[in-house]
Image (spheres, grey):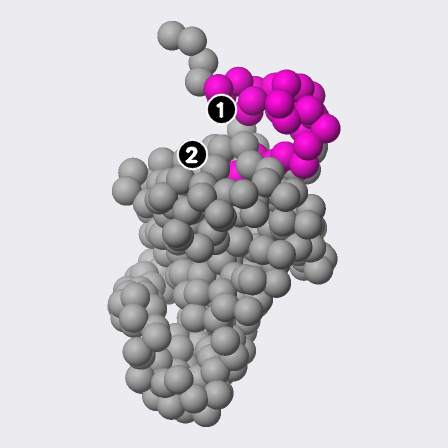
Amino acid sequence: MPMSFNQTIIEEFRANAGRVGGPFEGGDLLLLTTTGARTGQAHTVPLGYIRADGLLLVVASAAGAPDHPQWYRDLLAHPVVRVELGTEVFEAIAVPAEGARRDKLFEAAVRAAPGYGDYQAHTTRVLPVVVLEQDTAEPRQVADLADKLLEVHTWLRGQLRHVRAEVDAYFADGQPGDGRPPGLGLQVRQHCLAFCEGLTHHHTGEDAAIFPALARSHPQLRETLDRLGEEHRVVGRIKDELVALLSGIGAADPQRFRAELTRMSTELEAHLAYEEEALLPVLAGVPFPPTR
């Protein structure tokens, strides 16, 4: 079966450190990998990108088609994406801009690539401008599983602080529609979903693999591991309530949303601290990545 046009571009991009020929020769091109909203499968597309105000942007233009492209619908469901830019590969959180910020960034995109203005003229939908936010934290040295656990915990703590700051800004005056920075709803939603997905992935991995392995090799930890597993379920229930509230954040009650977020912060911080105290000494003896 012949390769699709996109797959041909993807393979050429990866084989030539991000350089491609044909209609994209000399253009600013990246590969974006999203997680399917319906399938949960990874899907990669080549996209033009723009840099503006120090930000990395992609526009969900679909050449002016009446509907949003699938990759945009995917990142609304799963905000954490993988970006390939030249020889660089990194994870990012995809955050669509809103309101005046979106308009300003779209104007910058049109100045850089006038074709986006033509695409907008051919459709009644507002073309989304997506900011790809890369984690700029200094990478940690990871030599063992204890280091890896601390790396994940540091990311979770940082994301939760970020979400709380954005929620405080969004609900600035405590009343829906009063005093909110314009267009912050999607930003809160995307960062909160990214945090929740990261938390789910981490706890699922521990429950399915790490905790059972520790229970076999260190039976004296069984009571501790049972407690940590129960804490996973408590934190998971709070996470599910937050995700449900996010679906209608524009009408969410500020006090309830903040209360759930505070409850998440309290429960999660206590859980992470207990897990570090109980498991880091044991995990420090397990090489990471694993060796045969």
Q: Give the range drawn in magenta.
A: 5-34
| Total numbered circles | 2
Please identify the quadrant where the N terminus is shown. Answer: top left
Q: Quadrant of residue 246?
A: bottom left
In this rendering, position of residue 84 left or right of residue 32: right
Q: Which of 276 and 155 is in front in this view?
A: 155
Percent x, y of residue 237: 27, 68
Residue 28 included in the magenta stretch of the image: yes
Amino acid type at circle 1 is Asn
Which residue is painted at 63% across and 43% down in the image? 114
Residue 280 visible here: no
Q: Residues within 10 Å of mark 2 (few under 14, many from 20)?
A: some
How far is disc 2 from disc 1 in space, using C-alphas? 11 Å
Amino acid type at circle 2 is His
Q: Quadrant of residue 12?
A: top right
Percent x, y of residue 281: 56, 59
Q: Relative to 274, say whether 143 is above or below.
A: above
In this rendering, position of residue 226 left or right of residue 269: left
Residue 250 visible here: yes
Kind of element beneath mark 2: strand
Residue 280 included in the magenta stretch of the image: no
Kind of element beneath mark 1: helix
Percent x, y of residue 178: 43, 88
Q: Residue 6 carries which label?
A: 1
Q: In which quarter of the image is residue 107?
A: bottom right
Percent x, y of residue 58: 56, 46
